[in-house]
Structures are given as C-alpha cells and as structure tokens.
Amino acid sequence: MTAADADREGRTAQPSAAPRVVTKNIGGVGMLLWQLALGIFLLLAWQGASDRLVDNFFISNPLDVGRRLIGWTMDGSIFMHIWATVYATVMGFVIGSVIGVILGIWLGVSQFASRLLNPYLSALNALPKIALAPLFVLWFGLGIESKIALAAVLVLFLVFLNTFAGVREVDQDLIDGARLMRATRAQIVGKVIIPSALSWVFAGLKISVPYALIGAVLGEMIAANRGLGYLVQFSGSQFDTAGVFAVLIVIALLAVALNLMVETVQHRMERWRIVSR
Amino acid sequence: MIDIRHISKTFHKGDTPVDAVRDINLTIARREIVAIIGPSGCGKSTLLNMIAGLYAPSSGDIVYKGSAVSGVNTDVGYMTQKDNLLPWRNVHDNVAFPLELAGIAKAERTERANQVIRHVGLDGFEDRFPNELSGGMRKRACLARMLLYGAETALLDEPFAALDAQLKLAMHDLVLRLASENEQTVVLVTHDLMEAVTLADRVLVCTRRPATVALEQRIDLKRPRDVLNVRFTSEFKDLYDTLWERLRVEYREERV
C-alpha cells in the first residue's frame, strides 16, 4: 500500500513525459495487483526451486514456513516471544528517549558540560553499541532487562544527538530577546529552548524506533530464553530453516507495524511540527 | 540617562580584527528621542546591542541611570531588525510573553495583552501564528510586546525598514504617541533620513565602518508632531538638507 502510494506520488512529481506514458494507466489498485502477483510469483519460484535447484535444508519452502507459523500460532507459543520482543523494544525506546532528551538538553544548554564530555561522547558514539551486550548480560542478567538496556542504548544516542543539535540550533536572537525581558534561566530553557528544539527531538524519536527493535532482537540472539531474537537463533542452531524464515517474517511484520504506528503518531503531531519549525 | 563614554567595539573575523564602532560619545537624556543614521552595516546595531548589554564594549563604558552596564540590561525594550517573535506562539501569547515571564496571572495577562494588541491594530489576529502574518504585522506584534514589557527605554533597530510607505507613517505616528504616553526614552537606528528627522529630537550621522559620530543635529520641530505634514514644512526641509549634505559624503566614499 505505502509503496504503491509513494510510487504514485513519485510519478506525478516526474516532470518528464516519457516514463509517464508507459506507466500512466497503473493506478493504486492496479499496482497493488501487480505487487501481489510478484509476491505470488516469488513464493511459487521459491517452492519450485526448493529441492530441485537448491537443497530444501538451506532454503526450506513456503509451505513448511506457513505450517510452522500456523503451528506456533495454534499452540500460542509465538505470542510469548512476540510479547517479549515488543516489551523490550517499547521499554528500551521509552527509557532511551527520556535519557537521550534530558542529556541532549542539558549538554545543549551547558557549554561547560558539553565541552567537558565531548571527547568521551564521541568515543562512545563511535563504539558499536552491540559490543556492549556482554556487559549488559553481566549487569542485568539473562532476563528481559539486558535486552531493554541494549535497545535503550541504541535509542539513547540517536535521540541525544538530535536533541543536542536541536538545542544548538535555537535562534540566539530568541534567547537574547527573552533575557532582555527578564527571563530566568529555567524560563529560557522551558519556554524558548525546548519548544524550539521540539521538531528535532521528534525527528530523533522517529528514526530511533527501528533501532529499538534491532537492539531488542540482537539482545535476545546473544543470550535469552524467549523473544523473537532467541527463536531465530534457536531455530538456526536446530538446523530448522523453516523456523528461521517463519521468525523473520514475524519480525518483518512487527517492524512494519511499528513504522505504521510512528507514521500515525507523526501525522497527529504534524501541526505541532509545522508550528515549532 | 544613558551615558556612552568612549565606546569602541572590535570583532575578530578569524585573525583579522574588524572595528565596528570607534570612540563614540553620546549622552541621552530621559524622554529624549535620538535617531542614529548611517550607511548599512556601519556598526549602528552593534551600538544598540551594547546599550542592551548583549555585547560588552571592547573599550569605554556605557552608564545607564548612573551604573555601568555589565550584563543584559533588562530596563530596555529592544526591537531588533529581525522580528524575534516565538514562532510556536500565536500573537496573543507572544505579546503576553513578558507578563508570563513575570508570573502575572492568566486573566490579567490576557486583558492587558488584548489592550495593546488593539492599540497596534492587530485585534482579530490574536490567534494567528507569526508565519501567518505579514512583515508589518509581525513588527506591530513586536512593538506591542515591547509596550507590554513597559521598558522605560526603547531601542529600535531599523524597525520599519521592510514596511510600505503608508504603514510606515502609521507606525511613526504610533511610536511618537506611545513614547509620549509612556514617557519613554527612544534610541532609533535607521538608514531612512526622513524617518530620523520625523521622529527624533536629535539626529546623529554615523560614518562608514568603523562608526564614529560625524555630525550631531538638534531637531527643533515642535511636538506633538503630525508625522505626515511635518515633512512639508520649511524647517523640516532645511534640517533634511543639512543632514543629507553630510550623509552624502559617507555614501559617496562608499561607492568609490
């Protein structure tokens, strides 16, 4: 749906006439049919290739994957894993954003703190955050807490960097104007800096949602006893290719659902965003 | 009331020092309206920024009501060249901002804000956001806000440069009326000689960068002035010619 919409918009924006003539008659519904056709073709090709071109052991086949998905749904075991991953993603996102926003505003406002911490933050930011996973397992154990921590750390840096940039972008004239009107420091932060940086904060929150999912899934792959990351890892270690594909599909659907949620929230906030620009 | 003593300001652009203001001396009395005129970019705004305490002078002192300005001077209202309304607040909330900062209750804020908004002719636009207003309306909103802040001194930095001639006249009238009602001291920076002579008690002509005072001219036109008709009097024409004679030199040198 979204791909079709984007495609259509792209085409109407096209100034040149030549490609337009070729694709003119394919509207939203038509493109949806084409996309479905492509999906069915790929599934058939996969089914056909399995065991004929490539060993079923390596690529499994759609029917087996479907049976696995149905089996997991019927016995309800998949929901426990989905819930674990969603919980870790959401908690990681919330904790990471709150800390990231606070840190971004604090360092953005305080020259001293930002210059003091600058080299350390650059080093931490350059560090692949996934490498922290063993530490988190040591600190927070094998349970959900270590996954939340990993997701939170990924989110934290993205949100922090955006908030910090937003605070630094605040028009100095607005701050000077408020100072001349006897604004206290707290008032300047609360009534000028934060509202002004808000659109940057939202941008940071938006791009960090997929990273929260990445953090949670990776955390589960490293050490866990539940969650989609654990399930894909477990299926792989059992040489259960159908299981791996089945989990990948669930993760992909979860990612799509999260993106849709973000888009809905963003749509609601559109007015805010325009106003705060 | 404002005593500017041997003020100089040097900026550093990389390693090269740029003199913006050099050795300006100026004493402004209470309730006086002083216009500072000179070529664009000559350092007039820098002077206002120093009176507001946003920049510290490189040398010299600014004494405001007997004490040296050493930080942000909150006794002044400053209307900058670029309007600095908060883009996420509507006209009412922007105008009421100084009262909000002072912790005044909402009901009183609204009442007083609406009163000044009516004064500057923006009634009906209270709910609009700055990006929905014309340049002139934004200027008027800034003026209303400054008015509500109730500063005893108003610093105006080319406040009406972007307005059309008719609106400019209306604003000149408003400024003169408000300054006299509120017993304000006004420092006006402009590059419009007509505006300077119409409004001021005294006009200072600044040289090109670095700005120094080239000529100081009293404007003895009687008050209250009719901003439209005053410019057709012979006194006005004489003053205008004297000032233009000196100002021309600055522009001629600039062209060479």
Image (spheres, coloured by chain):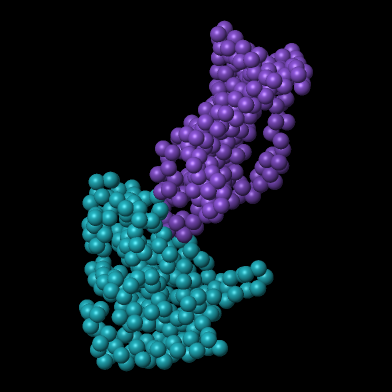
**Residue drawn at x 43%, y 42% as measured from the top left:** A270
Percent coordinates x, y for residue A56 in the rendering: 74, 16
Percent coordinates x, y for residue B208 in the rendering: 51, 82
Q: Is residue B95 left or right of residue A235?
A: left
Q: Which quadrant is home to the N terminus of chain B?
A: bottom left
Task: Check the rendered structure and report the hue given to chain B.
Answer: cyan
Q: B186 and B152: which one is in front?
A: B186
Q: A25 and A70: which one is in front?
A: A25
Task: Check the rendered structure and report the hue given to chain A.
Answer: purple
Image: A142 above or below A275: above
Q: B39 and A29: which one is in front?
A: A29
Residue B96 visible in the displayed image: no
Percent coordinates x, y for residue A246 in the rendering: 63, 18
Residue A54 visible in the displayed image: yes
Question: Quarter-wise, where is residue A133 in the image?
Answer: top right
**Residue drawn at x 50%, y 75% as measured from the top left:** B41
